[in-house]
Image (cartoon, rainbow, N blue to C red):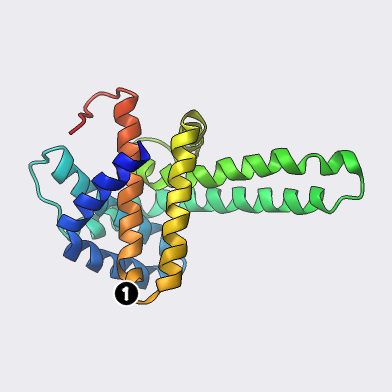
Amino acid sequence: MVWESVSTAAAVFWRHLGMLVVANILWLLLSLPIVTWPAATAGLFHLVRRVVQEELEASPRDANLSDFWDGFRRYWLRSSVLSAIDLAGVGLIAVALVFYGSSTQEPLRWLVGPIGLVGLAWITAQLYVFPLLLQRPGSRPWEIMREALLVALGYPLSSLSLLVTVLVLLIAAVALAGPVLFVFFSAIAMLQTVALRQIVIQRGEPGMVAT
């Protein structure tokens, strides 16, 4: 399923390369103040989702750059709360790993393994957080985070394969740097959106049709 997501995302991304490069640059600029990063990310994913709907779901309206700003304005609050939950979770897991890992009592150090698995699940869930934010417009941020975790746990092989794919692409992008960064984040958003769409189709949710 991961290869299908990668090939589909690559094809859709290529057909809208120009607009997605501009969106990628906008995302980079709006992420610099840090505080606007969640809203910018929501805007990027909103545009990518509109592109996916146009290409794979025969949407009657074509995607355009205004969808980025529409997502930025519409989801800034929920995306900010969701990002705060993410950071709190990462911080809690990191503190627990340091605390139990540095403990001199052997039974406490045994907890490092289970906590590490929780951390892996939390990181893997991040692949679905922003796509679900748009897929579930009526859900609260903590409900979205919970569903992202359930998706990651419910589809472990696909999720871990997707995580490895994203990490490999990230390493390649960092190594190449330069112009690659002008397309990388839009491309990853496309991959995450298509991957969630494949899972939603596999789950048989109404209104989703495989193409």
What residue would you read off at disc 1?
Answer: 179
User: In terms of image quadrants, where is residue 202?
Assistant: top left
Helix or strand or loop: what does disc 1 sit on? helix
Q: Is residue 33 visible?
A: no
- In the foreground, 110 or 164: 164
Left/right of residue 85 with respect to residue 76 in the rendered view: right
Q: Residue at x 30, y 70 (%)?
A: 25
- In the foreground, 38 or 125: 125
The mark total stands at 1
Residue 132 x/y as whole percent:
37, 40
Residue 11 x/y as whole percent:
20, 50
Q: Residue at x 23, y 62 (%)?
A: 20
Considering only vertical position in the picture, is 59 above or below 36?
Answer: above
Image quadrant occupied by the C terminus: top left
Q: Which residue is drawn at 40% across and 35% down?
A: 139
- The residue furthest left is 60
Dot 1 alpha-carbon crowd within 10 angstroms: few under 14, some 14 to 19, many 20 or more: few
Q: Which residue is drawn at 34% across and 63% down?
A: 184
- The residue furthest right is 105
- In the foreground, 33 or 90: 90
Residue 131 x/y as whole percent:
35, 44
Considering only vertical position in the picture, is 210 above or below 161?
Answer: above
Image quadrant occupied by the N terminus: top left
User: In terms of image quadrants, where is residue 64?
Assistant: bottom left
Q: Can residue 154 be seen in this view?
A: yes
Query: Could you tell me the amino acid type at mark 1?
Result: Pro
Left/right of residue 55 with respect to residue 152 in the rendered view: left
Residue 209 x/y as whole percent:
20, 29
